[in-house]
Amino acid sequence: MTVWEYAPAPESRDIANLKPSYRMFVDGQFADGTGEPLKTINPATGEVLAEVGTASTADVDRAVKAARRAYDKVWGRMPGTERAKYLFRIARQIAERARELAVLESLDNGKPIRESRDVDVPTASAHFFYHAGWADKLGYAGYGPDPKPLGVAGQVIPWNFPLLMAAWKIAPALACGNTVVLKPAETTPLTALVLAEICQQADLPPGVVNILPGAGDIGAAVVSHPDVNKVAFTGSTSVGKQIQAALAGSGKKLTLELGGKAANIVFEDAPLDQAVEGIVNGIFFNQGHVCCAGSRLLASESIVDDLLAKLRTRIATLRVGDPLDKNTDVGAINSAEQLAKITELVAAGEDEGAERWTSPCPLPDKGFFFAPTVFANVSQAMRIAREEIFGPVLSVLTFRTPDEAVAKANNTPYGLSAGVWTEKGSRILAITQKLRAGVVWANTFNRFDPTAPFGGYQESGFGREGGRAGLEAYLDV
Amino acid sequence: MAAPSTSTDHALPADLAEVTRDESTLRRFLHGLPGVDQVGAEQRAAVLGTRSIKKASKLWAIDTAISMVDLTTLEGADTHGKVRSLAAKARRPDPDRPDTPQVAAVCVYPDLAAVAVEALAGTSIGVASVATAFPSGRSARSVKLADVADAVASGATEVDMVIDRGAFLSGRYGQVYDEIVEVKAACGDTHLKVILETGELVTYDNARRASWLALLAGGDFIKTSTGKVAPSATLPVTHVMLQAVRDWHDRTGQHRGVKPAGGIRTTKDAIRYLVAVHEVAGPAWLTPKLFRFGASSLLNDLVMQRRTQLDGHYSGPDYVTVD
Amino acid sequence: MSDRVTVAKTYKLYIGGAFPRSESGRSYPVTDAKGAFLANAAQASRKDARDAVVAARKAFGGWSGATAYNRGQVLYRVAELLEGRREEFVAEVTASEGVPARRAQSLVDFSIDRWVWYAGWTDKIASVLGASNPVAGPYFSFTVPEPTGVVAVLAPQASSLLGLVSVVAPVLAAGNTCVVVAGQNRPLPAITLSEVLATSDVPGGVVNTLTGRTAELAPWLAAHGDVNALDLTGAAAGQRTDLERAAAGTVKRVLRLPAAEPDWTAMPDITRLRAFVEAKTVWHPVGV
């Protein structure tokens, strides 16, 4: 039989414009941080990409003061029409430097270049473009004729979509008239710092955006700084709870976007081939490092065997490897720490009696990689059905009736997202009404748009990002 | 309804044979196939279209694509001269590079099939003849069968028939099925491709149903289009058909082929189709026995790209022959 | 030292993405505010108007079918090009309206910002004007605003750029295509604006610009069976009632505002976005 091996098709590294060192961005300038510098690595190879100066708590104070000055004197009083034009510039510059940003993101994060090129970077640009248009139209957003900003926003973002999460935080905050101090994740600081450069080149007034690389302690310093009026956090539920507790009684406005354990529900009349694609995308997109990943497949018992057979065939064609190769479907796990967590939970799955199948795909011999894995015969009581794995591991459960599907889907403290697959329109609407999840995808999965609010129920967080609803987080309403 | 050919490669497992017992059973079966979500199908085709095929894998793809071409001329103005010229091109797609593969077949109207057969004598290049009142299919059964008999008698090694789209769209699946079965019988050992004319069927659901109908009736290949109606072949509809032959194989163990035709003009497009074959149906289908391109101008683009790969610089139209 | 002789620009119509002369072969002189000759403008005929409507209809499917994001990006691109040609427009407005240079600059700045304002509306109209309807029954019902179709716009007579932009941009932002009759005596900025549209990713036929006698062209557009809506802004006070009557023959949506031109520099509201959308309500049962 013919074997057609695709030759390596690497995107060039050079365009990432990688520098040996990066510095924090405060008050419109790149400056030496007084924290201990960190080395950011490429998780696909283990190589050190760059040294990054980090912020100390003194730097956090400097940054908040700069943000406050910018808010009081410049940004908070600038007409929305003028603010809008800065945001439009930033959107366009992200689009102009799209390829550079995409390659840099794949180097720093480990995600396939196809995803950073086709999803992360264009969506980040779109986010700025959309919110730019709100800056001088806030009176139409449903919050009263002249809603006001809150002041200084302290924002902490995760490592799974570094540039996109920075866009989700910064764009609405600025559109509403706030200034920001943002801490990117410890393992993925680079694209946020290039975004800072873009802000500089767009002539954004100094202090409006401040980017402070650092670890969890600096994030804590940002969110608890007394002169921060609004805190936004995307990350794990456990840290989210800590932040919420720490902010109790402070009067600071808070939004949280935390973890999830989404159910992807497939009925017997689903468009089957597209459901397979949706399941695969739901759990293997971004290596499963997605808070809204469809990590639980809830399949109708009448079709689960056929579905699993199709899934295994399809998953075996997924190409796992060099993130910079344009044909790679699944890239590297972001860190050794994350790989260890995934490995531990997968072992638990086997111990608890679920039936494991792992793709026989070849894996690179260095870097952090995990082969796509499917557990069948999973029950709600197992750890792999309850805990967020945040990796390329799918747990498959079954249901007999729509009510049972809903009950199992909702049987979790999380509530971020869900999927429903059926060709019957009324069933889509009935099921989505009953699902306790902030985002429900019907006959599709992992669709993101700046106009569509995103956020969770219960322990997946509160507050929404995107759309009219997403503006609320950054207005004094 | 007519019984399909009982040669081993077309014997139906019992549950599928049941399905063809009468028109209403056939209808329930076809309408019971899973639907195809348009957006999801087009998305998968688009994502697979971003595969980047380079270097040795690209050269392999080009050579494979050349060997899968059914080099086609289907014009009212076709003459013996035109067909002979096409046959010469089929034998030697690039006279300066004798190592270039030959194409799989030439494809002509039935009254010119004999000319093609004579011009290709001594080669293993097939002669495919269209038939059954191509391209419209609007004619009496007897006329269509006579058309097939004529093509077969002229020495065609393959027959590309069209289904009756009017009958299909008005739900007369039994009639469409019977016609294919009778054509297959008239073909004897001649290989049968069934043209669905997906551009007129419009929906992917219809393309899936028509694919299964043609496979049940014994078609060796399912083919997208006549090339005379827009849209002709598209990547998403070819995906649906590749999925059908894959599912058919899983169900019956039989390998059936797929041929997209019309509108495929560039090597880049052809490679996208090969990626679809590779990842949707499977590596076993990467052979002219199971996949063909119905094309004319594609061949010169493939030849030019082949030269580019081998010479290291872009080629130009003066370096490839007109047929 | 002799002065350099300039190359005078010819001002033609803008139809279907191209710049043809009027099929009638007519033109008329355009003068500046003091009466000095500026240029001849094409004097459009009813057949030009007819061709413009055909072009606008042809372009409607693509423009209304594009994503709101795409429309927003295209409109923003227009603003980028306007900004780049700012000096040219300042000169046009100064000549057309006879205003001092500072005022002309301010009007051009407002025009650019106005265009940006509307560019930012394309992907927000649905959130602001649409709704999910909590009907009393097991149905999911929602209402979305859709563009009405081809809009005939009678552009303001006095404000040759800012007023023009203020009536055209909202029509496009909502997803419609249009036939614009430029201000009769101050038509030149409209043609220069059309040059910007032609080079900025706006598909041909989305905007079609006619110069000529408003009173001659308006009745043909008002009665035309393939025009969905009519913006009476630039119509003479004495002609308005007749135009409304003509529009009634095909039940057009007619935007009627006070005859006197407003202060175009004031921030608009969304009247002009609402005027050219249809609300579509959909129902679907909810049940397993």
Image (spheres, rainbow, N blue to C red):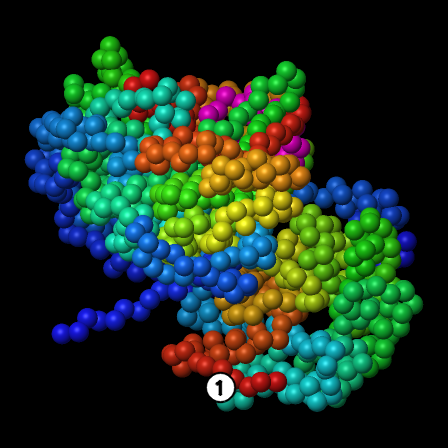
User: Is A136 in front, or is B247?
Assistant: A136
Q: Crowding near pointer 1: few (<14 within 10 Å), some, many (20+)?
A: few
Quarter containing the C terminus of chain A? top left
Q: Quadrant of residue B117?
A: bottom right
Element on which disc 1 rests? helix
User: Is A304 in front, or is A125?
Assistant: A125
Q: Quadrant of residue A211?
A: top left
B225 shown above or below C98: below
B19 shown above or below B183: above
Where in the figure is residue B268, as x and y percent of width and height?
Answer: 50, 67
User: Is A165 in front, or is A354?
Assistant: A165
Q: What residue appears at the point 21 percent right and 28 percent down from the top-left corner?
A: A77
Residue identifier under label 1: B318
Q: Which residues are magenta?
A: A422-445
Q: What residue appears at the point 87 percent right and 65 percent down from the top-left corner?
A: B139
Q: Amino acid at mark 1?
A: Asp
Q: What residue appears at the point 9 percent right and 41 percent down from the top-left corner?
A: A31
Q: Is residue B97 left or right of residue A76?
A: right
Where in the figure is residue B88, as x and y percent of width and height?
Answer: 64, 87
